[in-house]
Structures are given as C-alpha cells and as structure tokens.
Image: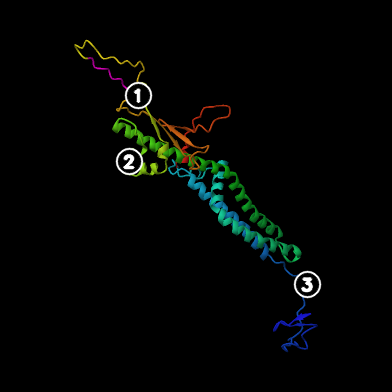
Amino acid sequence: MTICPCCGFKVEGTLSQGCASCGACSVGEALPKPEHELPSYGRSLLLAVTGLLMVLVFLTQTIIALVQRAPRVTPTLSLSSVIPWDIWSWVAAGETAAWRLKWIAIPVTIIVLWGSLKIYRSMLKSPARFCGLGYAKTGLMASALVPVLIAVLIGVTVPERLRQRQLGLQAASYALGYRVDRALLEYSARFGTLPADLKDLRRLPDADGSIAAALSNLDASAYKPSADLAALPKQKPHTLRGAVIRNASLDTATDDSPGEGLSFTNYDLPLPGADKLMGTEDDLIVRDGVIIASESVRRPGTTKPYLLPPPSPKARL
C-alpha cells in the first residue's frame, strides 16, 4: 500500500499510473533504502537533558538555602566560611529546598515522567534506530529520583514542623497569660490591690492596645481574685486612755470577715490552650503569675497538675 503525498489517498501498488483520487503521478522510481542508516540520538539527548535540568534545579535551590543559612558575618571570605561542608547542613538545606519546590515539582514531575516514559518505550521497541540508550535511561532515572528525594525530605520534616506548630500555638497561649499577668502587676502597683474584675484593667493606659486585645480573648467571669488574710498587715486597736469599763461582747464567736479595705493579693485565671477552647485538656491556669496546666491534665499516676515547660525560643520567632 502506498500513500499519495499530495492528497493522502491510499493506493494499492505504486503511483506510476497516477493517483486515483487526485491524478498525481510519480516523477521516478522510489529511492532504495540505504544499506547503513545512522541511529538517531535526539530522543536520548532529550531525556538526558531533562533529567540533568531537574537535578540542577534542585541542587541550585539547595545551595541557595545553604548560603542563606550561613552566618552573615564571617571572619574570612573563603568559600568554606559561606558554604559548610558537614552533611547535616546539606540535609537541612535540602529540606528547605524541597519545601520550596513542592508545588512546582508535582505538576512538572507528572508531565516529565509521562513524556519520558513514552519516549523511552518507543526507543526500546526499535533500539537499532536509536543510540545513547544508556544516557536516556540515566536521564529517566534522574527525572524520577528528584521527586522521590523531594518527597522523602518533606516527609522526614513533617513531625518536626508539626512540633514547631504546636510550640507556636503554645507560645501564643503563654503570651496571652504573660500579658494579663503584667497588666495585673501594673494595676496592683498603681492601686495597691488586684482588680476585683478583669474589666477594671481598662483603667490602665493601653497605648498599643495589647490589654484590650488580651481581654477580648478571655472569659472575664473565670477570673477569681483572693486575699491571703495572714499576709495582710494587722492594725493594732487603739486603747482608750482612762477608760475603766469597756463594753464586752457577749457573743463568743469571732468575726473573721474582712473589712472594706481588703486588698486582693492572689488570683486564678483559666486560659484556653492551643485549641482556643475552654474546658478541654490543654487548658492553662495563670496562678499568681505562674502558668500551669489545668487540673484536668495530670501525669499518669499523679493527682497534681504539673508545670508546663517554657516555650521554646524558636516558637517565639
């Protein structure tokens, strides 16, 4: 079967008698195929260059992340002072590069692997027509290795990133408690007592609005001030000079109720935990400036609340 080059009509035999569709005639006999046909290297070169480009992109991003992690002030201007040579610095830089390339690598990997596999399979069907099969295979493996490496580097950092996120949420809860405690100390230093209600903190100057922001995230009704009667200064009764007869109370019961001038010295303030919800297991309590876990959160085998660790410096950044 012969296909007419003019109209595409399929003809049984040759076109020496002309095409039955358009009437085109051949100008001569068809050239015979050469005895030795040179193999093509275009497809092998395409696969090799594609794999090399993916490796270079990932390596470039890794070096950029490594330079950014290097100290800004170095005693010398040598290359070793800018780019460290220890393996863990490169691993950390690779993790940073993987997170930066994750959204670009996914669609590019799908397109590159689909096209590369299709080209490589066509080369395997007739290997005599193509050269550089080894380079093509290496390029295909490099194209597949880069996304696998990105996925592995992202996977190993997921637990640490979740821990950092939890520390960040915990630091936010601590910051709220510390700001309220500072406001309470300022109120106590200014008025000589803790406020009976958290709304009284609005009497303090709040230039940056941090007190108002903290109060908006708190349940003011949960604030419980108290007074340590033993710590309050006792006033000595004034004796009447020259008095012979004193009125004695017939009631033997003592009156321990505080007077009108009582000053609050202690307080308890429940805070929401990382989930921003009250009444859950991660709730906190600010007790006289010390942030502790809620009494509902206890260590196994104990009945007392335990102190939470202070927030990590990394979580504050």
Q: Residue furthest top?
A: 244
Name the residue beneath numbered marker 3: 35
Which quadrant of the figure has residue 139?
bottom right
Name the residue beneath numbered marker 1: 257
Q: Residue at x 41, y 38 (%)?
A: 221
- Give the residue type that dot 1 points to: Ser
Can you tell which of label 2 and label 1 is closer to the viewer? Answer: 1
Can you tell which of label 2 and label 3 is closer to the viewer? Answer: 2
Label 3 Cα crowd, 10 Å radius (few <14 / some 14-19 / many 20+): few
- Residue 120 x/y as whole percent: 70, 61
Is residue 89 among the parts visible in the rendering?
no
**Between discs 2 and 1, the one toward the N terminus:** 2
Q: Is residue 114 above or below residue 182?
A: below
Q: Nearer the viewer, residue 251 or 197?
A: 251
Q: Is residue 139 above or below residue 296?
A: below
- Residue 146 x/y as whole percent: 62, 53
Name the residue beneath numbered marker 2: 202
Q: CA distance from mark 1 to mark 3?
A: 117 Å
Q: Quadrant of the N terminus?
A: bottom right
Q: Which residues are magenta?
A: 232-239
Our reading of the magenta stretch's main secondary structure is loop
- Residue 149 falls inside the magenta stretch: no
Label 1 Cα crowd, 10 Å radius (few <14 / some 14-19 / many 20+): few
Q: Secondary structure at mark 1?
A: loop
Label 2 Cα crowd, 10 Å radius (few <14 / some 14-19 / many 20+): few
Q: Residue at x 60, y 56 (%)?
A: 106
Q: Secondary structure at mark 3?
A: loop
- Residue 238 falls inside the magenta stretch: yes
Q: Secondary structure at mark 2?
A: helix
